[in-house]
Amino acid sequence: MDEQLPQTGRRSFLKAAGLLAASTAAGCTLESHVPQSAPASAVPERETGFDRTLLSAVGHAVLPEELGAQGTAVAIDRFVAWIDAYEPVAEEMHGYGYADIRYLPPDPAPGWRAQLTALELLARRSKRKPFARLTMPERRELISSALGGERSERLPAPLEARHIALALLAHWASSADAWDLALGAKVQPNTCRVLGEANAPPLPIVGLRA
């Protein structure tokens, strides 16, 4: 996306997201960012809870409309489960040929929660209504304003997203469901198919919208 995100319109706002999904997923594999949980005694307690009403309102504004209400709810639930399980500054898996020890980024959840709160405050001050009660064009207008001059040719990896709206979209775009939606078939990358179905064409997506 070379240009700044537009202000209104579902199609003009994130129509490119579906097209980017397949190319983005290859660089944003979800499993690579979720290390195994450490013993409870080794990790300090952290709060990750989001205002689900606000998060849902953002999700319906930025995720592809082809997901429908049910698909959008599933995407949001998976995003919350992912960040709840995230272990900040955990040691990364060692890649082949790497001698140095690398660590994952700090916890992004507090900043993302603060951005949700900021969207709510902005909605109440500029539109005189809670964010969740705004029309879709109004929500996208405020999200675009919050993103400012964000420019990129592709979505960031979820943990590198500088705003909750981009994080939610990038997390979905790194999923197998994004591949399926982009290709219009049940491809489900990174999953094993039984030997007898190896040469069978992928099944079409049925009943996506709800």
Image (cartoon, rainbow, N blue to C red):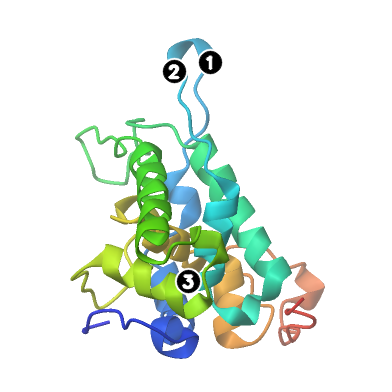
Query: What kind of residue is marked 2?
Result: Val
Q: Which residue is mark 3?
A: 62
Circle 3 packing at 10 Å, graded few (<14), some (14-19), many (20+), is many
Q: Estimate the spatial distance between the alpha carbons at disc 3 and disc 2, rounded to whole Å.
A: 33 Å
| Of labels 3 and 1, the one closer to you | 3
Q: Can the viewer see residue 54? A: yes
Q: Amino acid at mark 3?
A: Val
Q: Earlier in the sequence, mark 3 or mark 2?
A: 2
Look at the picture and state if 47 lies above or below 208.
above
**Rendered-image quadrant of the N terminus:** bottom left
Q: Is residue 175 visible?
A: no
**Residue 8 in the image, given as x and y percentages of width and height:** 40, 84
Q: Which residue is mark 2?
A: 43
Which numbered disc, 3 or 2, marks the residue closer to the eye? 3
> Could you say whether the residue bearing mark 2 is in a helix, strand or loop?
loop
Determine crowd level at label 1: few under 14, some 14-19, many 20+ residues with C-alpha closer than 10 A.
Answer: few
Q: Which residue is mark 1?
A: 40
| Element type where label 1 sits in the image | helix
Q: Are the residues at dot 2 and dot 1 in contact (C-beta closer than 8 Å)? A: yes
Please give the name of the residue rendered at 35% of the width and 36% of the height, measured from the top-left corner: 107
Residue 76, quarter of picture: bottom right
Mark 2 residue crowding within 10 angstroms, few (<14) / some (14–19) / many (20+): few
For marks 3 and 1 on the same chain, the one whose residue lies earlier in the sequence: 1
- Between 200 and 83, the one lying in front of the other is 83
Closest to the observer, 206 or 195: 206
- Residue under the image location 44 percent in, 62 percent down: 128
The local secondary structure at tag 3 comes to helix
Along the line of sight, the residue nearer the viewer: 210 or 88: 210
Which quadrant: the C terminus? bottom right
Amino acid of disc 1: Ala
